[in-house]
Image (cartoon, coloured by chain):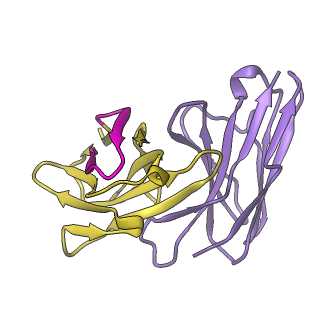
Chain colours: A purple, B yellow
Amino acid sequence: SAVISQKPSRDICQRGTSLTIQCQVDSQVTMMFWYRQQPGQSLTLIATANQGSEATYESGFVIDKFPISRPNLTFSTLTVSNMSPEDSSIYLCSVNGQGGTGELFFGEGSRLTVL
Amino acid sequence: AQSVTQLDSQVPVFEEAPVELRCNYSSSVSVYLFWYVQYPNQGLQLLLKYLSGSTLVKGINGFEAEFNKSQTSFHLRKPSVHISDTAEYFCAVLFSGGYNKLIFGAGTRLAVHP
């Protein structure tokens, strides 16, 4: 299994500002995934981050709004730009388990509230 | 189109009663199947998974699930629930060729009452 640490765990932000969420993994991983969980909703994949290449975004998510960095095999950041109240969500970082079985390990999540 | 459906948004149940949380998927390709649990204010934890082999899969905390290919279902069961099982449960499916992209169901909130 992988141990995933996210910072911040929660934050309250003002409309129009940007916030960067950090994700640190205790082992080297090829792919890291960023999910969004809106209040009372399921998880929606935002993007897949590979080291050394640009992130791959899912339909409905764009790089200008959610820029992602992946400088090495154990770290990634997700920025939520120009926030609005609709961005209030839990943002979760996840990584694959070993063996390519599709199992994901999740961080505790970063709970953002935008006022 | 590939999709995952959790048929019940909420399931209330009394302590020590059995429970079944339903999950169906739509796919023309092979799948890997997962159940995750999310306790309040926490991240997701894997309960169990089906990759291949026996269709009855046992997981943590006394949960089990059965893969039924003909009915494209992967229902989660527990013979006797505890108050501590109160949480949100998510079914997730990895479709073959899905580049490790898990698709999650909408979730089922299990509320166990004394």
In this view, the residue in front, B64 or A18, is: B64
In this view, the residue in front, A9 or A104, is: A9
> What span is in magenta?
B7-23
In the picture, measured across the screen, residue B79 lies left or right of residue B38, that is left
- Asked if residue A26 is positioned above or below residue A78 in the image, the reply reads below
In the picture, measured across the screen, residue B23 lies left or right of residue A36, that is left
Image spot of residue B31 (x, y percent): 29, 59
Q: Is residue A64 visible?
A: no
Residue at 62% from the left image edge and 40% from the top image edge: A36
Image spot of residue B99 (x, y percent): 45, 59
State the quadrant of the N terminus of chain A: bottom right
Image spot of residue A104 (x, y percent): 52, 63
- Asked if residue B22 is positioned above or below residue A69 in the image, the reply reads above
Image spot of residue B75 (x, y percent): 25, 51
Q: For residue B10: magenta?
A: yes
In this view, the residue in front, A29 or B24, is: B24
Q: For residue A95: magenta?
A: no
State the quadrant of the C terminus of chain A: top right
